[in-house]
Amino acid sequence: MNRFDFYPGDYLRDTIDLRPDEEGIYLRLMLWYYWNEKPIPDIRAFLIARVASDVERQKTKWILERFFKLEIIEENGVNIKIWRHKRIDREICNHHQSLLQAR
């Protein structure tokens, strides 16, 4: 998606207790999810969040566990871990429905 609706009240309510670095991690994960229109592969989460240190990795794991839900899916006989975000999935679905209606 090239754009998405942003709800400041919802965002602030959910993130008011985050430190700036934690908020940056969460925003990067959210933006990647919207841009790719798919869940975050667990194996790429640290790369997507652009973290390097062990402390940053711990924070990223905490952000993922707090805001996302871990799922295991099977692709070509291989189990893959992905992180889903309920609100983002709903917004992507609504976006696709709007595109279909516009056609």
Image (cartoon, grey):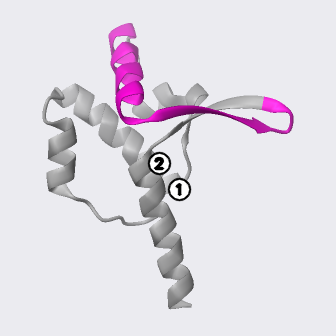
- Name the spot of residue 79 as percent of width and height, x first: 75, 29
Amino acid carrying mark 1 in the image: Glu
Amino acid carrying mark 2 in the image: Tyr
- Name the spot of residue 38 as percent of width and height, x first: 56, 50
Residue sitting nearer the eye, 74 or 30: 74
Q: Farthest residue in the bottom direction?
A: 103
Q: Are marks 1 and 2 in contact (CB under 8 Å)?
A: yes
Residue at 18 percent across and 29 percent down: it is 18
Instruction: Determine which residue is flagged by label 1.
Output: 37
Q: Which residues are magenta?
A: 54-78
- Name the spot of residue 49 as percent of width and height, x first: 41, 32
Residue sitting nearer the eye, 36 or 97: 97
Where residue 5 sits, quadrant-wise, is bottom left
Is 102 situated above or below 5? below
Q: Tell whether 25 sits left or right of 77.
A: left
Counting other residues with Cα less than 10 Å from the Cα at mark 1, is it few (<14), some (14-19), or many (20 or more)? Answer: some
Q: Farthest residue in the right direction?
A: 77
Q: Farthest residue in the top direction?
A: 54
- Name the spot of residue 11 as percent of width and height, x first: 21, 48
Counting other residues with Cα less than 10 Å from the Cα at mark 2, is it few (<14), some (14-19), or many (20 or more)? Answer: many
